[in-house]
Image: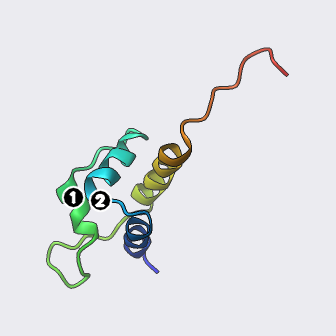
Amino acid sequence: MSNNDILKKLRVALHLRNDRIVEILKLVDFKITTSELGAFFRAEDHPNFKPLGDQILRNFLNGLIIHMRGPLDKPKEGVE
């Protein structure tokens, strides 16, 4: 299964639109446009298809964690 397939399945399972995925990626300071994102969802034989790299998938998953759970609290110094 390719990274493109994983992102497609997550988009369907979580009912995410492309603009929401762009917002999720912004949570981890990763900027991408909706048209760039659309290239990952095209069929592999389409001329504008782009393979989804590990870095983008990793950033999406990290952003999804923040989106679903919220940011991690910073540990307080001096408290054990």
- Residue furthest out toward the top: 78
Q: Residue drawn at (39%, 47%), measured in percent from left and top?
A: 24
45 lies above or below 51: below
Could you tell me which residue is drawn at 37 percent across and 47 percent down? 25
Q: Is residue 16 left or right of residue 37?
A: right
Quarter holding the C terminus is: top right
The outermost residue toward the bottom is: 45
Q: For the residue marked with disc 1, what is the amino acid?
A: Glu
Q: Between label 2 and label 1, give the one nearer the viewer.
A: 2
Q: Position of residue 35 (x, y in %)?
A: 17, 58
Instruction: Give me the disc on residue 17.
Output: 2
Disc 2 residue type? Arg
Q: Looking at this rendering, what residue extends furthest in the front direction?
A: 15
Q: Earlier in the sequence, mark 2 or mark 1?
A: 2
Residue 53 is left or right of residue 41, and the answer is right
Crowdedness near tag 2: few (<14), some (14–19) or many (≥20) residues, C-alpha within 10 Å: few
Which residue is the site of mark 1?
36
Residue in front for this viewpoint, 62 or 50: 62
**How many numbered discs sit on the rendered protein?**
2
Tell whether 39 sits left or right of 62: left
Measured as percent of width and height from the top left, residue 45 is found at: 21, 85
Q: Residue at x 21, y 58 (%)?
A: 36
